[in-house]
């Protein structure tokens, strides 16, 4: 089973979501740790392979958590947010920009850690 790591405020953000949404996201992450893909997860295109988005809904709205399985030996949750707009299913640009920034930093940190350990 892969380990689970949380980037920046992603863990506290998920903990602020409604309980049923937390359960849905938590289970989808558990399935990812087992090397499988939850029905709630889908590839998030435009960020390189292995970046996935979990979508969970309840009466208060749509919630998303973005994770990657392609960096190192861990599952990294890089961002979580409530989707404010009900128009379209695309991830909003400000959220995508933040995800890109965090992925770039994470990839750099993992690459540097691998260099130090070899």
Image: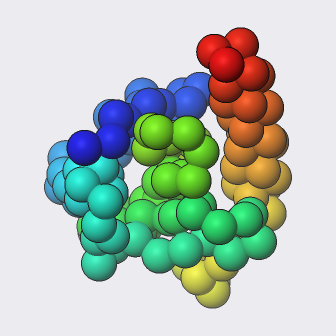
Q: Is residue 84 left or right of residue 30?
A: right
Q: In which quadrant of the rendered image does the C terminus lie?
A: top right
Q: Identify the residue at image location x=59%, y=82%.
A: 89
Rendered position, 28 above or below 74: below
Q: Quarter of the image holding residue 50?
A: bottom right
Residue found farthest to the top: 116
How many numbered marks, from 0 up? 0
Looking at the rendered image, the quarter that the N terminus falls into is top left
37 sits to left or right of 27: right
Residue placed furthest toward the front? 118
Residue 68: x, y in percent?
54, 52
Q: Residue at x 37, y 35 (%)?
A: 4
Q: Residue at the spot x=67%, y=25% of the render?
A: 114
In the image, taking residue 25 as reference, residue 12 lies left or right, namely right
For the residue pair 93 and 26, the one nearer the viewer reads as 26
Q: Is residue 2 above or below residue 5?
A: below
Is 2 on the left-hand or right-hand side of 34? right
Which quadrant of the structure image shows residue 17? Answer: top left
Say which quarter of the image contains residue 41. bottom left
Q: Is residue 16 visible?
A: no
- Judging depth in this view, the residue of 95 and 26 nearest the camera is 26
Q: Residue at x 74, y 63 (%)?
A: 47
Task: Give the image's coloring scheme.
Answer: rainbow
From the top left corner, tell me how far across and down residue 101 is, in percent. Answer: 80, 42
- In the displayed image of the protein, which residue is found farthest to the bottom? 88
Between 94 and 65, the residue placed more toward the observer is 65
Q: Position of residue 103 (x, y in %)?
A: 71, 44
The reply to whether residue 27 is visible in this rendering is yes
């Amino acid at each position: 089973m892969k380990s689970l790591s949380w980037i920046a405020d992603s863990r506290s953000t998920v903990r602020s979501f409604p309980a049923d949404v937390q359960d849905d996201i938590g289970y989808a992450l558990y399935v990812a740790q087992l090397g499988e893909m939850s029905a709630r997860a889908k590839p998030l295109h435009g960020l390189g392979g292995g970046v996935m988005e979990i979508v969970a809904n309840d009466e208060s709205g749509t919630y998303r958590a973005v994770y990657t399985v392609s960096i190192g030996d861990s599952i990294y949750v890089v961002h979580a947010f409530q989707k404010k707009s009900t128009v379209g299913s695309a991830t909003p640009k400000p959220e995508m920009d933040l995800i890109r920034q965090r992925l770039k930093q994470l990839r750099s940190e993992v690459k540097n850690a691998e260099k130090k350990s070899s």
